[in-house]
Image (cartoon, rainbow, N blue to C red):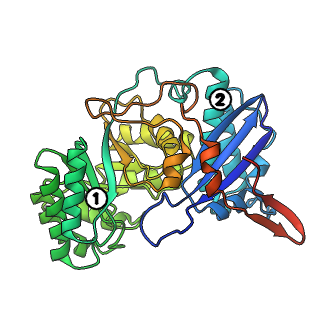
Amino acid sequence: MKIESVDFFYLSMPEVLDIGDGSQDALLVRIRAGGYEGWGECEASPLTSIASYVCPMSHSACKPLRYSVEGKPVNEPADIEKISKLVHTNSPDLLQTDHTLSGIDIALWDLLGKYKGEPVFSLLGTSMVYPKLPYASQLFGDTPEQTFAKATHTRLAGFKAVKFGWGPFGKLGLDNDIAHINAAREGMGKDAYLMIDAGTVFVEDWNVAKERLQALKDANVYWFEEPFINGALEPYKKLSEAFPQVPLAGGEGCNNFVQAKAMLDYAGLGFIQIDAGRAGGITIAQRIAEAAAARKITYVNHTFTSHLALSASLQAYAGMEHDVISEYPVELKPLAAEIATEKILPDENGFIHVPNAPGLGITVDTTAIKKYLVDAEIKVNGQVYYQTPEL
């Protein structure tokens, strides 16, 4: 079968707030071929990603992604890999390429899985899948008291792991950060996994980040995430070697394999976090997972949006028995919560499972999301390059 259509759907909450919450808008991709359709999600700016698919060509290395996708065959996994390589050949100077490709690649795997009647993980060569322990991923409260209340609620909800991030952390001084760390630990209890996400607030200043290490160590924090901007290899490496030692996590900002490999090789990470909706899709996420395994660095999915995105991010490491931790967003805006008809819910032991159904095993609720659909148009010199398609 050949790709017949590629449609982008820009969704948004009525108001998008200036907070570290990626579930306030979304870009879904629908690909149709041979009577089947697959769905993907880009973890990216919706309008700029659409533009990268339809924009006029600038030169031979800056073509819109449609040049590499439309009309291409998709009958085997190798066909999806060919499309990924072709995109990188035709559009290396288009800096939104990998974000847009991510949703396309995910949709292609979903499409092929439905065509073959197999889950995506099976198409990827995974015969044995393992449950993952979800950590309740959420923002810090505005005050330590709010963080304590959120942690307590998370523990009572049955979660064995939690991550707090962004919010006021790193912005109101060391004492305030320590108070939030201690509040999170107190609320979750001594036995839960606790992760702290700095949200890149220290940029490249490893000395300031180092001041938090003792408090993180005292609270038995499992990892310290994204103290610096993506690609700040030297600060990451220096902090990883500082005392007291706290394992570092990073990589969610990587939008291609080369960036992720640099983080694996030079940043001193204990955990690499990859979002299939940013890094180039499931195809690239699996390559990164394999590279991490070869370096004995734990692979973790990054997901802060819908359960469609969650399923996609889980596929790449579904067969990795010892990489058991999974990001699990618990504060989704209604938009993100309503995208998927099926939900990936913790079982009686607190673990989640990759859907064992054709494709991603997730149905997009096109009726529910219509109210979030943004009416958009991209026009150049009177020619319409994009209009919001019909759901």
Q: Residues within 10 Å of mark 1 (few under 14, many from 20)?
A: many
Q: Is residue 155 left or right of residue 369?
A: left
Q: Is residue 176 left or right of residue 304?
A: left
Q: Earlier in the sequence, mark 2 or mark 1?
A: 2
Foreground residue among 100 and 148: 148
> Where in the figure is residue 292, as x and y percent of width and height?
38, 42
Q: From the image, tell me which residue sits under label 2.
A: 112
Label 2 or label 1, whichever lies nearer to me, is: 1
> Where in the figure is residue 327, as x and y percent of width and height?
36, 46
- Residue 334 visible (yes or no): yes
> Where in the figure is residue 24, as x and y percent of width and height?
51, 61
Looking at the picture, does residue 314 appear above or below residue 154? above
Q: Residue at x 66, y 47 (%)?
A: 29
> What amino acid is found at the position of numbered circle 2 in the picture?
Leu
Q: Residue at x 54, y 30 (%)?
A: 361
Foreground residue among 334 and 165: 334
Q: Is residue 50 left or right of residue 194?
A: right
- Residue 242 visible (yes or no): no
> What amino acid is found at the position of numbered circle 1 in the picture?
Phe
Looking at the picture, does residue 141 appear above or below residue 123? below
The single residue placed furthest to the bottom in the displayed view is 172
Q: Residue at x 31, y 53 (%)?
A: 269
| Res 23 label | none
Say which quarter of the image contains residue 60. bottom right
Q: Secondary structure at mark 1?
A: strand
| Res 164 label | 1
Count of marks placed on residues: 2
